[in-house]
Image: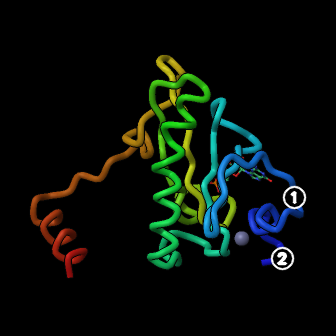
Amino acid sequence: MDDCIFCQIVAGDIPSRTVYEDDDVLAFLDANPLAPGHTLVIPKDHHESLNDLPADLGSAVFAAMHELTPEVEAAVDAPASTVAFNNGEEAGQEVPHVHAHIVPRFADDGGRPIHALVSDRPDLSDDELDDIAATIRD
Ligand code: 5GP
Ligand code: ZN
């Protein structure tokens, strides 16, 4: 994907502060960090969202995230982190090349938890919850 920023980083056409690399995965510091150590973990191949990502690459990305998260926290002396994907445009994904964010978190950093993603939670009945669970299972 010639016009994809992250593919250009993988190709070495745009510089990045790389912190991890293997055959399938690259991780580098976010250029506009939410916290010191804010790291992005990407598959080297271009796939737009998690939904498009082949299972083996999903495993490779997760393995790298799993290995990197404690290292990123330790590097900036963070006691915690938020690890997340903006999966699709409506979820806030701006770069259409799947990437995990590892955002170090600190006491009183003013950040919010995943529970603060939406301001109006849906009021779902037990039946509606049962239906949704059944649909996902099917
Ligand atoms: P998204 O909103 O798509 O989940 O996040 C995209 C992230 O990529 C943002 O946090 C943004 O700061 C970061 N980003 C965008 N362009 C570049 C770039 O050229 N280099 C690096 N290192 N990060 C970038
Ligand atoms: Zn790409």
Q: Quadrant of the C terminus?
A: bottom left
Point out residue 49 in the picture as x, y percentages from the top left corner: 55, 70
Q: Quadrant of the N terminus?
A: bottom right
Give the answer, above or below, for where 60 lies relative to 84. Answer: below
Query: Which residue does the image show at 52% across and 25% down from the upper left?
Result: 78
Which one is nearer the viewer's eye here, 122 or 74?
74
Which one is nearer the viewer's eye here, 93 or 128?
93
Query: Which residue does the image show at 47% across and 18% down from the upper left?
Result: 107
- Is ligand 1 within 8 Å of the beta carbon of the residue shown at mark 1? yes
Point out residue 68 in the picture as x, y percentages from the top left corner: 54, 45
The local crowd at label 1, few if under 14, some if 14 to 19, many if 20 or more residues have their Cα within 10 Å, is few
The answer to which quarter of the image holds residue 137 is: bottom left
Horizontally, residue 36 falls left or right of residue 70, namely right
Give the answer, above or below, for where 109 lies relative to 87. Answer: above
Horizontally, residue 66 falls left or right of residue 9, namely left
Query: Which residue does the image show at 23% across and 52% down from the upper left?
Result: 123
Q: Which residue is mark 1?
A: 14
- The amino acid on which the numbered mark 1 sits, given as a three-letter code, is Ile
Label 1: which secondary element: loop
Q: Which residue is mark 2?
A: 2
